[in-house]
Amino acid sequence: MQGSKLYVGNFSYAASKEELEELFKKFGEVKEIKVIEGRGFGFVEMSSPAEAEKAKESLNGTDFKGRTLRVDEARPPRDRSFGDGGGGRGRGGGGGGFRRY
């Protein structure tokens, strides 16, 4: 594992940051926890890649509050900018505008 940030999914919407911290601190120092409210997933950053790997191996597929956790290395965020790549309703082509007859 290269990074120390983990994706944690499929937990109860009611799970708190404190409950996740309690769960993950058994495997090392928890630096940061981000819970995506109402979505059942979040991110846990451990203090080292070794600790993150240990937590991943130990917790992935285990039961947490009646749900089976999915724990994996977090991927970098996708670029959500709208560059000059195709698609969409940008300039040129495609009707939709007013036409004069």
Image: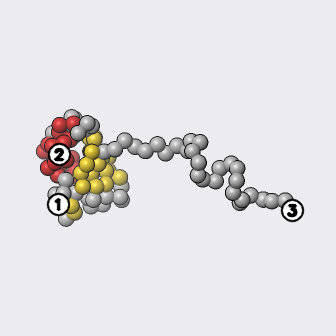
Give the mark, 3 or 1, whose residue is nearer the N terminus.
1
Kindly state the secondary structure of the residue where label 2 is placed.
helix
Q: Nearer the viewer, mark 3 or mark 1?
A: 3
Say whether residue 93 is left or right of residue 86.
right
Give the mark, 2 or 1, whose residue is nearer the N terminus.
2
The residue lying at 22 percent from left, 57 percent from top is 69
Front-most of residues 88 and 32? 88
Mark 1 residue type:
Asp
Residue on which disc 1 sits: 63
Where 10 sits versus 54, above or below? below
Counting other residues with Cα less than 10 Å from the Cα at mark 3, is it few (<14), some (14-19), or many (20 or more)?
A: few
Front-most of residues 93 and 88? 93
Separation of marks 2 and 1 at Cα, in angstroms: 14 Å
Residue on which disc 2 sits: 55
**The quadrant where residue 45 appears:** top left
One can see residue 33 in this view? no
Kindly state the secondary structure of the residue where label 1 is placed.
strand
Q: Which mark is residue 101?
A: 3
